[in-house]
Amino acid sequence: MSSHHWSENFHSAEELVSKAFPPTVPLIDGLLNAGEVGLLVGVPKVGKSRLVIQLAEALCNGRLFLGYKVTGKFRVLIADLENTPAMLQDRYNRMEVSITDQWYYYAPQTLCENALSLQGDGLKQLQAMLLEVHPDLLVIDTWRLLSGILDENRAGDITNALIELSRLRVDNPQMAILLVHHLRKQGVGRVHTSLRTDAHAWVEGVSGSHAIVGHTEFCWGLDSEIGRNGKEVMVFGGVARNHEVPSLLLEGEDNLRFRLAKSDSFESTLTDAQREIWTLAGSMGDSFHFNALVSKYGGNRKAVSAVLGKARDQGLLVQDAAKVWHFAPDPAETQETLKPVLKTQALSKK
């Protein structure tokens, strides 16, 4: 039973639209906000834990994550309930990770030594660890090993576990939480849905009750697919409640890291609307004015500014003292990579 009174969260519609709520604080622009609870989903051994390491490294060092801007340097706590400390050390060394004093791990030697859960003393120990670290992001790897749910197909059990999880944010409401989770096993004869082309259908395959997707702010996916050239590619994508999650093509490196695929590294970070703006920019020649691009797109200054900022952060655009934007030549890349080509068919505005 909740200890809160109904009047604490009761508003008239007039009060609701006029009340000044705290602004959303992004940790990663366009991808992750403070206070959100979300999922990272994929089949076992696809690379979810390695991607989590890259996420933590980017947040702790203030570096780009899959082409997206990290807005500062943040504190991260990863509760890795699957890998031993020695396994993690080996992975860190192979991935050549940049360690900072803002990065913390909890990793038991065996499953039976895990002291954390969402019930009783295990919940108290988890709360005490969070008070000690006070992280900006808590990662649970995996959700199943923390929740202790015997039947994850029961929506009520999932909902109750998420309620207990939300209590962890009482003393730190801005803490984001990422739950690493699995996909259901593919049945015989079942067609594999593409994360890249139909993220909503792909998310239907998340293991357990749909309540876990319904009661979280976003669901990221990591999956392997066969590309047009017949080779395996990794796809990062998903769905979110309040923004679009881009579909990114990733390549594996020898040191176990993921990187954006070279063939489309920038455009793959854009939504459909952003890609239209980028294509229009490419149709305006080697240089253009911001207002001219805004006019050509239809007047949405905020959307245009976001795309130009992303391109500048990637080193694809520069702005001179007269506020004119220029495509930045790079001898290491082809002009087709740096500058989008206008599609032959007319673009229709959204």
Image: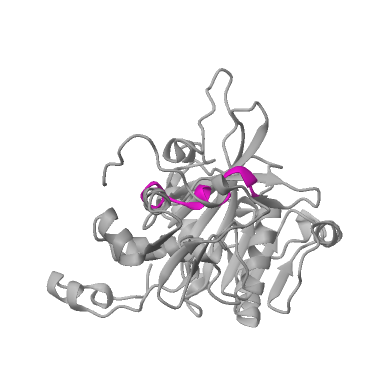
Residue at the image position 67 percent from the left and 33 percent from the top: 232
77 and 162: which one is in front?
A: 77
| Residue 302 is one of the magenta-drawn residues | no
Position in image of residue 191 (x %, y %): 52, 23
Position in image of residue 205 (x %, y %): 50, 36
68 and 104: which one is in front?
A: 68
Q: Which residues are magenta?
A: 260-275
Q: Is residue 251 left or right of residue 23?
A: right
Position in image of residue 321 (x %, y %): 45, 78
Residue at the image position 57 percent from the left and 58 percent from the top: 67
156 and 56: which one is in front?
A: 56
Q: Quarter of the image for the N terminus: give it.
A: bottom left
State how many labels appear: 0
Residue at the image position 63 percent from the left and 78 percent from the top: 128
Q: Is residue 319 left or right of residue 23?
A: right
| Residue 261 is one of the magenta-drawn residues | yes
Residue at the image position 76 percent from the left and 48 percent from the top: 253
Magenta stretch, overall SS:
helix
Vertical comparison of 209 with 339: above or below: above
283 and 18: which one is in front?
A: 283
Position in image of residue 159 (x %, y %): 44, 54
Could one spot residue 236 in this view of the protein? yes
Q: Is residue 219 left or right of residue 346?
A: right
For this orientation, the residue located farthest to the top is: 189
Vertical comparison of 188 with 196: above or below: above
Q: How has the structure been colored for display? A: one colour
Could one spot residue 49 in this view of the protein? no
